[in-house]
Image (cartoon, rainbow, N blue to C red):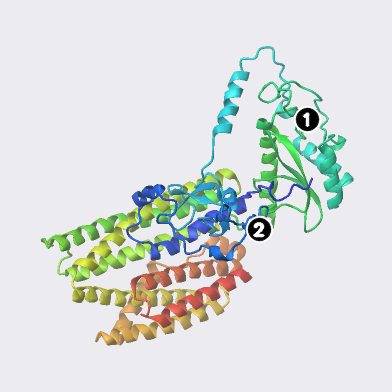
Amino acid sequence: MMSGHRYYRSQSLNAQWNDLSQSISQLLVEDENKPTEVNRVGQQAAVRSDTADITNKHWVDSNCRTHCTASDCAKRFTITERKHHCRRCGEVFCGACSQYRRRLSVFATPDAEGVPYRVCKKCYDVGPQTLGSVRSRLAEFGYYKERKKSKNNNGTKNHLLPLKALNYEEECQRLVDGFKKKAGSSKIMSFVMGTLSAVKIPEWQKSRHWIEKSDQCLCCYKTFSLAEMKPHCRVCGKVICSNCSSETLIVYVEDVNKDVNWCLINIIGSPDKEPDVCSYLRICNQCHGEVAKIQGRQAIMAEQTETDGLHVSLVDEMVTINQSLLDIQGNILRVLPMYEQLVDAVEAKGDLKGLLPQGGSATQALAKYHLDLSDHFTKFAVVMQSLKKLKPRTNTQVKLAKNLTSSKFCFYNDNFSVYRENKKRLEQILPYEVLEGVQKIVDDQAINSAYIVIKQLGFEALLLVSSEKVDDHIAAMLVKCEEICKDELQKQLQANDCEFEEHLKTVQQLLQIQLKKHRLVKPSRRLTKTYGAKYVEGFLLDRCHLLLSQTMRQLNGKTAVKKFKSSKHALETTKMQVMELRDQM
């Protein structure tokens, strides 16, 4: 049966994870533009006003819309039918199509601890509903209440079949064969079959365990009322109620190769959009759980056959990312209190003894703390982007990744707001000359760090070219970027009356130490031996993209917009070239 778009709710794991990945990407944008006065207390206070604090920069001009944007509504706006903006996508809808609520951050992204805002049906449905959503539990309460009552019924015959009595793969294949024989790939036949099945269930949909009649649901034992429908599960043949079943099993014709297949929507292995030719079938909750296991195994096996064998456990990847983030968190928690104490002492004009390193000045200490914290927060945001590369295969893995992401978001938001607040306090209490001195030190260190990272990255790329026969195009791009950073570093040092040649000698000595103890690119020896240059080149491109993003972000965050424009442009260009090479692999 052609169900129409309003019935299809396929939130495949890819669609769910893509939605969460968009929220992770926002972390790279939010801390650049996040106002210091926005915090969790402010968000909670915003409940009193549906538009308080949340951004509206992405809103569509309401004057450009004369009808509701929802495709299945298109209601014309009038004096009585007001226009409403979806707070997430920014489109204009009527009141009925924007009656849903979802918890959002002030940047209009899903946030489990955010404030409920008005959203459209599409934005309410997209992504996992356990993250940043609001819905009624009344129906579930009624179901469990009735189920508890039904347990007191005596003499109820249990028609439930043992799980092992059914061969679920054979039953699903029976549905595929029947659909192929009766409907084929015809949309018209599919529609006719769907219409007729509403009157009389076709024989091909009946299981060999088919139970023709029952006065009770054979899952929860609830007695059917006179007006209540008595549907059947198309897999096991039991009579079930609507609470114990759902029309989530579809038999469909694949859009590409025209093969007939079956799947459960809303889990791994389901199409991301409704197939053109499909039939929705009812399945009980008991069969749904068993069929879901089969579909999950098939999807994982299909994905493994498509890969080159470079498969690492998703949990192992999350553990690695989490450990990297924990290391950065430790650095932030170590430096941030010292920075805050120094700012408090400067503001109170108190004794700085014990707060400054031996022989150091307050200006140098403030500049160092500012640089360190900026680097740590930038690295934290960039490492968080690694979560987007994960490919969850089960709903449990999605929940695990969501919990990890949520906890890291909370840490980042709580501590970054403290850092921003102290930075703002410094700008208010320190004289302009001191602030200028701090910024001068920051500029020197920022361009110097960018130059050192790109130079070391280029040198390591050249080593891999000679040892692993990797394409030298990557090293050539990095060398070109390094030359531009070097020119601006030279101008910066000469403007401060520093000897550039002596500085280069110091950098060379530092690089020798770094190459021995702290390599930026360390491909796995085992995987290199197994897969050769292809693996090494892919690993090098991934590391280049990560380090270029981190370096570019640090340079943008520490310096003025007009400062080091050539280096910033070179970093951005090189990053885009690396992404293009990675996509071509």
Q: How many marks?
A: 2
Q: Amino acid at mark 2?
A: Thr
- The circle drawn on residue 585 is none
Along the line of sight, the residue nearer the viewer: 161 or 584 = 161
Which residue was labeled with disc 1? 237
Q: Secondary structure at mark 2?
A: loop
What is the CA distance from the residue labelled 2 to the residue labelled 1?
38 Å
Along the line of sight, the residue nearer the viewer: 172 or 322 = 172
Q: Amino acid at mark 1?
A: Gly
Q: Pointer 2: residues within 10 angstroms few (<14), some, or many (20+)?
A: few
Q: Is residue 209 left or right of residue 457?
A: right
- The circle drawn on residue 307 is 2
| Quarter in which the N terminus is drawn | top right
Q: Which of the 4 quarters of the picture holds residue 432?
A: bottom left
> x, y (%) of residue 435?
23, 73
> x, y (%) of residue 227?
73, 26
Q: Secondary structure at mark 1?
A: loop
Q: Is residue 207 left or right of residue 376?
A: right
